[in-house]
Image (spheres, helix red, strand yellow):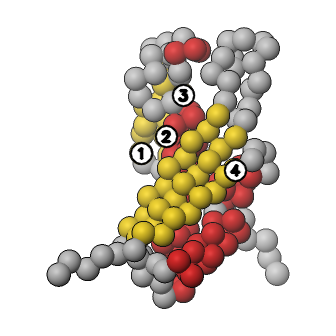
Amino acid sequence: MSNRLAQATVVARLAGQKGRAILTAKNHHVVVDSPLTLGGPNEELNPIDMLFGALATHVIFVCERAAQENGCALSGAVARVVGAFDPHTGQDPAAVPYLQSLSVDVRLAGPTEEQAAIFRAAIGSRCLMYTTLARAVPIALDLDIEPVTNPT
């Protein structure tokens, strides 16, 4: 069996304004700011926002795919990621330079409570962002199923 690794490439370059960079991925460009503690303007997304956003979106995409594969109804999905970290990292040599904890709260509309295990298992085994970050930091995963109400 051949090794089927995919690759993704992004490029970040300073934008000419202190604490601001341009991130390029595929043909898209995003302005990314350094946080205030590192002297940046912190007006645009910062690297932590990008990391947490990648985790949240990948979680809901994995849930969407798991629903399709298992014939589960899925009319909505929302993931909220919260992380704890020392905001002085990069500024204070005594700061702890890594995430202390993460929590991922997922709300799915449509599936049954019994189907929740399908989604939990899919996140824990198929979400590249989740499985990678879980090797480095404790992640609390909370998955809630919201019943879909039929208007009468």
Q: Residues within 10 Å of mark 3 (few under 14, many from 20)?
A: few
Quarter the N terminus occupies: bottom right
Residue under pointer 3 = 13
* Structural distance between the alpha carbons of marks 4 and 3: 31 Å
Residue plotted at (73% across, 35% down): 100
Amino acid under disc 2: Thr
User: Where in the figure is residue 51, as x and y percent of width and height?
Assistant: 58, 42
- Tell me if residue 145 comes above or below residue 14 in the rendering: below
Disc sitting over residue 139 in the figure: 4
Quarter the C terminus occupies: bottom left
Disc sitting over residue 28 in the figure: 1
Q: Residues within 10 Å of mark 4 (few under 14, many from 20)?
A: some
Q: Secondary structure at mark 3?
A: strand
Amino acid under disc 4: Ile
> Viewer-nearest of labels 1 and 4?
4
Q: Tell me if label 2 and label 3 are in contact, CB under 8 Å.
A: yes
Q: Tell me if label 4 and label 3 are in contact, CB under 8 Å.
A: no
* Structural distance between the alpha carbons of marks 1 and 3: 14 Å
Residue under pointer 2 = 24
Q: Secondary structure at mark 2?
A: strand
Give the quarter of the image for residue 89.
top right
- Tell me if residue 94 comes above or below residue 7 in the rendering: above
Amino acid under disc 3: Arg
Is any atom of residue 103 visible in this view?
A: yes
